[in-house]
Amino acid sequence: MKMRNLNPDIDKIKEVSYRYIKFRFRSEYELKMLLRKKGYVDYDIDNCISQLKKEGLLDDKRFAKFYAYDSLTIKFKGPLKIKNELENFGIEGYIIEDTIDELMKEIDIKEIVREYLEKKYRNIDLNKIEKHKIVGNLYRRGFMIYDIEGVLNDYIDYRKED
């Protein structure tokens, strides 16, 4: 028999939490901040988060993995930017490092840079854009210089052949 929660605030907090989680995965820290903004107290929030973790609905490792994968493959963000964003979501450092390391083993970062260049600069005359501006754009997106340089040179050579 399932015991009914005696604290009605916990039920309300869980209901609000379910609505947040329904749209996308959330980190523990992010959900805690959202619930604080709603005016709930930390004690009740922590109890709710504990229950959500037991139910498997809140998992920072899973959140980090999905967020990093989507950021890299869909939004073309580099590892440095993803790392920074995960830190802002309150993900612990060891989880971030493990997630980024695993992602770099699974995905060819140079191919992601190539795809981004093709998407962003496909219809643009590269002779009218200075190379350092493209490098700067990719660097601000969180890619490392050694990943950018080789791919960019190959891409420019490829486009000149067309």
Image: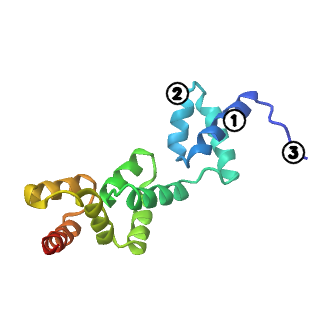
Q: Secondary structure at mark 2?
A: helix
- Residue 51 is drawn in which quadrant? top right
Crowd class of label 3 (few under 14; some 14 to 19; many from 20; radius 10 Å): few
Residue at the right extreme, as displayed: 1
Residue occupying the point 60% across, 27% down: 40
State the residue in front, 154 or 81.
154
Q: Which residue is mark 3?
A: 2
Residue 15 x %, y %? 69, 35
Considering only order in the chain, which callout, 1 or 2, is on the residue closer to the N terminus?
Answer: 1
- Residue 135 is drawn in which quadrant? bottom left
Crowd class of label 1 (few under 14; some 14 to 19; many from 20; radius 10 Å): few
Seen in the picture, residue 128 relative to 15 is either above or below; the reply is: below
Residue 124 x %, y %? 18, 56
Q: Nearer the viewer, mark 1 or mark 3?
A: 1
Seen in the picture, residue 104 relative to 64 is either above or below; the reply is: below
Residue 147 x %, y %? 23, 68
Seen in the picture, residue 20 relative to 155 is either above or below; the reply is: above
Mark drawn on residue 15:
1
Residue occupying the point 55% across, 47% down: 24
Considering only order in the chain, which callout, 3 or 2, is on the residue closer to the N terminus?
Answer: 3
Identified by mark 1, the residue type is: Glu
Q: Which residue is mark 2?
A: 37
Identified by mark 2, the residue type is: Lys
Label 1 vs label 3: CA separation?
Answer: 18 Å
Q: Secondary structure at mark 1?
A: helix
Circle 2/circle 1 CB separation < 8 Å: no
Q: Secondary structure at mark 3?
A: loop
* Residue 5 located left or right of residue 133: right
